[in-house]
Image: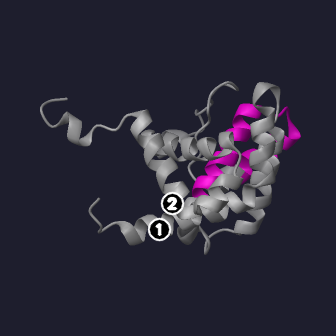
Amino acid sequence: MGEFGDLYAVTAEVALNFWVSNLRETMGWRQWSEVQDPIGLYLASVLGHFCQQSVDRKEILSDGYAPSDGEFRQFADLTQIAEMMMQQLTIGKSPRWMESAGAHILLYAGFFYRQNRGRHNIDFFSKMGVDCYRMAAVGERAKVMRLVAKGFRQYLFSFAELHRHLREKRYLIA
């Protein structure tokens, strides 16, 4: 990376630590302690995943985009999630895609709430996010998926608060 690599390189660990510390700060210690251990880490990993992924919107919106059931599917926006959800309800459900849709809803309807509230019915997508995580609750990750579904609305609010917190804090030098 060159001599400045240490200044701008972000590893998965650094990204995860950033989101964990900011979620904890935004939620407050009392609320953070009420979130079961794997859930706080999962929520931070959702944000960490998205901040490290480059997304080609043109590819995602193309007719040829067809990830396998085992892949973490990318979604361009909330409308595309709603369309996919209708298709998944009429055919076999992919738990991985359901988790992906739920995570995208957390990102778009939660973290980017201000940008999406005028375009989409956030309450509708909140209910859809709960359903996505319920459908993703299979296998060894079932417990975590059920816990995320149970607290989904709270996590949407926490993500929106986190976004507001980071916007207000952007001029502070740590």
Q: Quadrant of the C terminus?
A: bottom left
Q: Which mark is residue 25?
A: 2
Residue depicted at 55% across the width and 41% down the height:
45
Residue 103 on the magenta span: yes
Q: At numbered mark 1, what does the secondary structure look like: helix, strand or loop?
A: helix
Q: Is residue 54 left or right of residue 86?
A: left
Q: Quadrant of the N terminus?
A: top left
Residue 10 on the magenta span: no
Q: Is residue 99 left or right of residue 16?
A: right
Q: Label 1 belongs to which residue?
A: 165
Label 1 Cα crowd, 10 Å radius (few <14 / some 14-19 / many 20+):
some
Amino acid on which disc 2 is placed: Glu
Residue depicted at 83% across the width and 40% down the height:
135
Residue depicted at 83% across the width and 43% down the height:
134
Q: Position of residue 162 (x, y in %)?
A: 52, 63
Amino acid on which disc 1 is placed: His
Tell me, yes or no, whether the two marked residues, 1 and 2, touch with CB atoms within 8 Å: yes
Question: N-terminal of the two: label 1 or label 2?
Answer: 2
Question: Mark 1 or mark 2, which is nearer to you?
Answer: 2
Main SS, magenta region, reads: helix
Region rendered in magenta: 82-108
- Toward the right, the furthest residue is 90
